[in-house]
Amino acid sequence: MGEKVLITGNEAIGEAAIRAGCRFFFGYPITPQNKIPEYLSYRLPQVGGCFIQAESEIAAIYMVFGAAGAGARVLTSSSGPGISLKQEGISYISAAELPCVIVNVMRAGPGLGGILPSQSDYFQATKGGGHGDYHLLVLAPSTVQETVNLVMDAFDLADKYRNPVIVLADGYIGQMMEPVEFKGRPPKELSAKDWTVTGAKNRPRNLIKSLYLDPEELEQHNLKLHRKYLEMAKNDVRVETYLTDDAEIIIAAYGTVARIAKTAIKILREKGIKVGMVRPITVFPFPYETFTEISEKVDDILVVEMSLGQMIEDVKLGVCGRANVHFYGRVGGMVPTYDEIVREIEKIKRSQV
Amino acid sequence: MKSLYENVIMAGFGGQGVLFIGRLLAHAAMKEGRNVTWIPSYGPEMRGGTANCTVVISDEVIGSPVIASPHALIVMNNPSLDAFGPRLETGGLLIINSSLVTRETKRNDITVVEAPANKIASEIGSDRAANMVLLGAYIARTKVVTKENILEALKKVLGEKKKQLFEINKTAFEKGIEIGSL
Amino acid sequence: MMKVVFERPKSMFPVPTHYCPGCGHGIVHRLLAEVIDEFGIRERVVGVAPVGCAVLIYNYINCDMYEAAHGRAPAIATGCKRVHPDLILFTYQGDGDLASIGTAEIIHAANRGENITVLFLNNAVYGMTGGQMAPTTILGQRTTTSPLGRSPKREGYPIRIAEMLATLEGATYIARVAVHNPRAIIAAKKALKKAFEVQINGLGFSLVEFLSPCPTGWGMSSTEAPKWVEEKMIPSFPLGEFKVPKSEKSVK
């Protein structure tokens, strides 16, 4: 057992990356995630790593491209507007099959929006985000400890699939302090990176690219990427089910909203309303099957998000008409309270009888 | 033993040290093996221009780190009382810095502890330790963590660089304990 | 006894290029390969290809390579160099890539003093997309998007990259050369060699701008194009060294 430290989510992300063997960070300041670059700007040199504050998010993501192509574990972090700027590079990185980890500490949009917490980048993260037919593996932590664990896992998953992994946190997770333990973990056995660009010594040269002018060749490349996403869906879906066994109504939520929902569930159960929760931890690949199964058991599912309804589309795909899917969301940096969630569930309960 | 669950919002002007005493409380709770969350002025709480933080302490896994109606409220100035006073839950504990809070709370369903924190802090030599007086009063009333663990957290958070501030903060904290124990 | 007086550089694949007759890219590729051979560094060279006509440079130069997005080559080279400081990094970029969409990346790579070498090919036009106006299109020059000829009032002025980057403290070696005749090509190779030497010696950022003919983009024959470089381009983009390592005196 390691010692627990009280640390903000943003700093914990930085430290978790270092514990996972990441030695390179390229980023550009944006609220509410500035503690990540600030933390790494002094921590990385201590462990022989390198931190660069890039001239823009665009430059930062291509520095990530360069470092990932050179075989390094590399991190960048940003928030909504900055992640939008990085999308070009993320598409190229996905196409070139380079492993890297991207953290989005979500703030409210669109446009400059605000700096307060939000889940409005769900579509952007889970449906590709940039141009072309590709996906990121998307991890959505709910506590600071889980953020630490998932950031570490993210590097392993990125290497496993040679694919960018995005950690989709909301602003609260970045700002909040919680006791955290950085658990020692055995290094994952991964296949050697024989595709990296490190100088063509005693081997044919390596080339990292995304241009395929021959349509048949590009189709094959697209299919290869697609097979990876199917593999992710087969092997790496993560989901938490909470008090679902006896539940008559299910809440679907992720991130901070899922924590708030847990408090609402406690209050509702004290009132005698049996409510449970399905919390996707990977939002791509999405736990469709869990929702399919749950929709056989309950008539009503309430999706709660800090958006006007993004994850709900995936929930509906899993439910596929077998249950009523309701929605409650707050946006703009406003956060659904447990009282509001309780009220929504009571409304659904009343409509059942 | 009943499982512990407490939450508190602390609010004041920027610079009055409300985030600081929130951190001390969070550190002490962690030391005692509790789950704890600390959120600074962020999210919807940022409106109104007060500096504030929310601390939740629990034996069980903490659900919402965001609290609509807190069990306790520490207010260091008038705007904080205006912003958070109405949200305090019925039967809740309101700790007021009576040196700066001139308004009266209109509520009679709560417990109010008034501490002239700035006055006391000035008397012992540093106006800036007013936050510790209020934390002392809160700890004396709730006993959510021990005095000793707050002082240990104080030592830890001040660190080597600011250890000369320990004694004055400790004295202020103890004055607050006295007031809270009345 | 027979003596070899001319051969293909070892760092070049034995394949024909896709470039148009009279284009300067092939010449600059060859100079690059010769310099890599002469320094004996092929096994530790990593190149970054641009978007533009030269995107396929990796089909011709035999070393480890990245293919960048438009304008981003200096950022990619930065990422790689920071991971492996012992590698020799070059980017190869055209005028649209470097002087338009990638201005931020090139300025900041130079300003950080990234220890990389940039080959900047300036042919005053967007070649691959079909002859549109470039940031370096000269005044009066007609292109498919400046059909009336570039006018400062409408389209602004051609950007002089070498002069601009030479003002940055982080830049160590900045030169402009041309590849429109044999004498110019010999001088160009000398500058390129110097640029790589700067990097090998760890002295910082180096860039060589090559003025290069684009007969197709200019709507000229491949004999007219070199003349246009001499008569029109060079007066707009004077040749010379704009910044040299501190130990050396500028010979502009």
Image: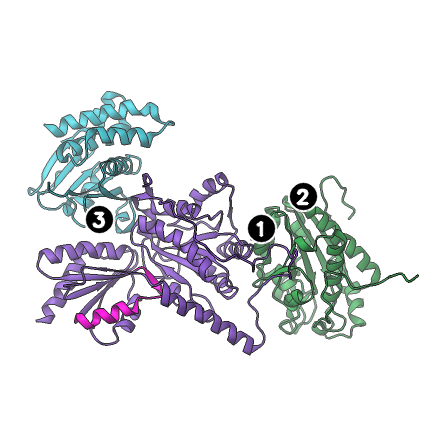
Chain colours: A purple, B cyan, C green
Q: Which residues are magenta?
A: A281-299
Q: Compare residues B128 and A257 and report the one nearer the observer.
A: A257
| Residue C144 location (% of width, % of height) | 64, 74
Instruction: State the quadrant of the N terminus of chain A.
Output: top left
Q: Residue furthest right?
A: C1
Crowding at mark 1 (Cα within 10 Å: few <14, some 14-19, many 20+): many
Name which of mark 1 and mark 2 comes first in the sequence: 1
For numbered disc 1, what is the local secondary structure? helix
**Disc 3 designates what residue?**
B62
Which chain is home to disc 1?
C
Amino acid found under the numbered disc labelled 2: Leu
Q: Which mark is residue C203?
A: 2
Q: Nearer the viewer, mark 2 or mark 3?
A: 3
Residue kind at label 3, given as amino acid type:
Ile
Image quadrant containing the C terminus of chain A: bottom left
Query: Which numbered marker is on residue C108?
Result: 1
On whether disc 1 and disc 2 are found on a single subunit, the reply is yes
Left or right: where does residue A62 sit relative to residue C20? left
Q: Residue at x 50, y 40 (%)?
A: A45
Residue C192's disc is: none
Identify the element where label 2 is drawn.
loop
For the residue pair C26 and A243, the one nearer the viewer reads as A243
Q: CA distance from mark 1 to mark 2?
A: 17 Å
Tell me the chain of label 3: B
Which of the two marks, 1 or 3, is nearer to us in this view?
A: 3
Quarter of the image holding residue B179? top left
- Please say if the residues under marks 2 and 3 sit with CB atoms less than 8 Å apart: no
